[in-house]
């Protein structure tokens, strides 16, 4: 019992010693906690995850005033991310403005685009930029594709509107076809062979004209149905293609048939009358469809299944907590042993009954206690003051924080035991912080990193902390406990490495 009590006394003595040492240096606490916290907090508040607006100048080589006015109309109405900066006819002058930073993008529009289309050539709009950031270059590429799609949509919409405007001609042709059909019926009733053949030819001619007009105007509506995989049912108004083909075949079949036989003729003409009614119904449906729906039948609505709307500050807050606590624990531990070695405290440990295990365990407990208090204060500020949501359980949150601090302290003690002086220890701590900032997923998603490089990410305690705290605070659950188990296992391995290094240090002659 007495050896156990002596072990406890020697180990816990480090708690008072280490905390007193920290409290004697209040500026160190302020520098380690408030400095990085304010920097990362300012970044989280100032970060805006919004698409950038580009000042865009259109270069038009054509002098056609109507064409220039249409380009200006499009440029001013394409969308909020395109800031219309005017129209120029001098590409060299526009490039000079781009180099001076007065504009962000140049759109070069070729002259006579309609002629290019008639020659079966696409109209290529060249977009010039002067970006050096690869992310911004990719954004410009996406920006150009989005707005080219919008221009194509507007062109198709104009075609659809024109097709609907042409339905007046279709109605006239439909009326002429019906008139020919009525005249043919009357000729059959009168048993006038000459009139029958004359009206038969006129009906066929009117039907061919109707087919040409209708086929071009209503093809968009049928294209949407085919893209949807919708099967056309006989007799449906939307089954335009089949109705037209069947109508033409029926009219063609009139030639050479015995139209002077009333029963057979009536059946044929009734079938033609039915098909004309089907075409008329399809025409009515087509006129009721919004042109924008015809050319853009599919749209997306983005919804989150989450119960809360998160801001950028909410998203970055767990990462700030993980980075700060790792930096705090590593720096405190890194300055611990190297400082005692410089002032000669390690020499006292060597001649005292305290063992290396008791020394390292006592330091772990003291810094865990002190860092835990700071973690509680930091969490309170984030949750109560900044209103960052905490959807998960506090028990799992506390376990995650404890594992993060435990593993970070192990890394800090190894740095302290390997560093030759305080300057080296501080440098190693800062290198660890910088590595964590860029590779932990705090600022950039881990998926954005090349897979072999992610190995570096998962050697940092902050990576596990960021992943766990974000899921726990913002989603309410972790789901996969492998990262938490991995963080604890890494912490245990680092503890034994630190213990081994401490034994070597205290046994050194």
Image (spheres, rainbow, N blue to C red):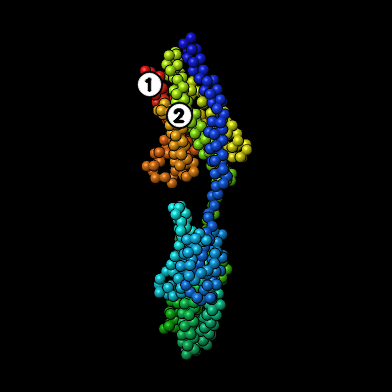
Q: Position of residue 507 (x, y in %)?
A: 38, 18
Give residue 504's mark. Answer: 1
- The residue lying at 50 percent from left, 75 percent from top is 63
The span from disc 1 to disc 2 (Cα, nearest Å) is 20 Å
Residue that mark 2 sits on: 422
Vertically, is 285 above or below 22? Answer: below
View extreme (right): residue: 385
Residue nearer the viewer, 299 or 385: 385
Q: Position of residue 324 (x, y in %)?
A: 52, 35
Horizontally, residue 384 falls left or right of residue 153, namely: right
At 59% from the left edge and 40% from the top edge, which residue is drawn? Answer: 388
Considering the image in quadrants, where does the C terminus appear?
Answer: top left
What is the count of numbered marks? 2
Q: Nearer the viewer, residue 208 or 294?
A: 294
Cβ atoms under marks 1 and 2 closer than 8 Å: no
Residue furthest front as drawn: 343
Considering the numbered disc 2 on the image, is that residue within a helix, a strand or a loop?
Answer: helix
In this view of the protein, can residue 106 be seen by the observer?
no
Query: Residue 216 at what x, y percent from top left?
Result: 48, 73
Counting residues from the start of the chain, the first of labels 1 and 2 encountered is 2
Secondary element at tag 1: helix
- 10 Å crowding of disc 1: few (<14), some (14-19), many (20+): few
Q: Is residue 197 above or below residue 292?
A: below
Query: Residue 165 shows which numbered tag?
Result: none
Quarter of the view holding residue 447: top left
Give the residue drawn at x 61%, y 40%.
386
- Whole-percent x, y for residue 105 in the image: 49, 61
Q: Nearer the viewer, residue 22 or 46?
A: 22
| Left or right: where 496 falls relative to 386 | left
Name the residue furthest top.
2
């Amino acid at each position: 019992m007495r050896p156990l009590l002596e072990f406890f006394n020697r180990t816990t003595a480090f708690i008072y010693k280490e905390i007193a040492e920290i409290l004697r240096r209040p500026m160190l606490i302020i520098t380690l906690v408030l400095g990085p916290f304010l920097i990362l907090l300012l970044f989280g508040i100032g970060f805006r995850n919004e698409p950038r607006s580009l000042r865009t100048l259109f270069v038009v080589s054509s002098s056609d005033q109507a064409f220039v006015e249409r380009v200006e109309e499009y440029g001013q109405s394409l969308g909020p991310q395109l800031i219309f900066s005017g129209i120029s006819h001098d590409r060299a002058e526009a490039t000079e403005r781009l180099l001076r930073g007065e504009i962000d993008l140049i759109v070069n529009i070729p002259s006579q685009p309609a002629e290019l289309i008639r020659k079966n050539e696409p109209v290529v709009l060249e977009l010039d930029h002067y970006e050096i950031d690869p992310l911004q270059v990719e954004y410009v590429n996406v920006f150009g594709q989005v707005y080219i799609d919008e221009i194509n949509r507007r062109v198709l919409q104009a075609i659809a509107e024109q097709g609907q405007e042409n339905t007046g001609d279709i109605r006239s042709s439909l009326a002429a076809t019906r008139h020919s059909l009525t005249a043919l019926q009357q000729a059959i009733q009168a048993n006038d062979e000459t009139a029958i053949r004359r009206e038969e030819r006129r009906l066929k001619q009117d039907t061919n004209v109707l087919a040409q007009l209708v086929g071009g105007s209503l093809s968009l509506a049928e294209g949407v149905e085919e893209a949807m995989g919708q099967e056309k049912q006989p007799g449906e108004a939307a089954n335009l293609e089949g109705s037209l083909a069947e109508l033409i075949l029926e009219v063609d079949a009139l030639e050479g048939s015995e139209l002077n036989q009333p029963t057979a003729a009536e059946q044929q003409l009734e079938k033609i009358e039915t098909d004309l009614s089907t075409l008329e119904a399809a025409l009515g449906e087509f006129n009721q469809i919004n042109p924008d729906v015809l050319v853009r039948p599919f749209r997306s609505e983005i919804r989150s299944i989450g119960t809360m709307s998160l801001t950028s500050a909410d998203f970055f807050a767990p990462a700030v907590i993980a980075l700060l606590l790792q930096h705090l624990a590593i720096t405190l531990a890194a300055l611990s042993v190297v400082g005692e070695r410089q002032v000669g405290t390690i020499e006292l440990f060597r001649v005292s009954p305290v063992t290396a295990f008791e020394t390292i365990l006592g330091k772990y407990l003291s810094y865990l206690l002190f860092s835990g208090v700071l973690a509680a204060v930091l969490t309170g500020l984030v949750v109560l003051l900044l209103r960052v949501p905490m959807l998960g359980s506090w028990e799992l949150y506390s376990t995650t924080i404890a594992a993060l601090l435990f593993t970070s302290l192990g890394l800090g003690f190894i740095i302290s035991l390997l560093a030759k002086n305080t300057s080296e220890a501080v440098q190693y701590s800062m290198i660890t912080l910088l590595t964590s900032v860029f590779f932990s997923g705090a600022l950039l998603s881990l998926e954005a990193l090349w897979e072999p490089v992610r190995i570096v990410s998962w050697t940092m305690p902050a990576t596990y902390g960021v992943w766990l705290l974000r899921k726990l605070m913002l989603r309410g659950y972790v789901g996969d406990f492998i990262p938490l188990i991995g963080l604890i296992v890494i912490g245990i391995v680092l503890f034994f490495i630190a213990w081994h290094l401490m034994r070597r240090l205290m046994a050194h002659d």
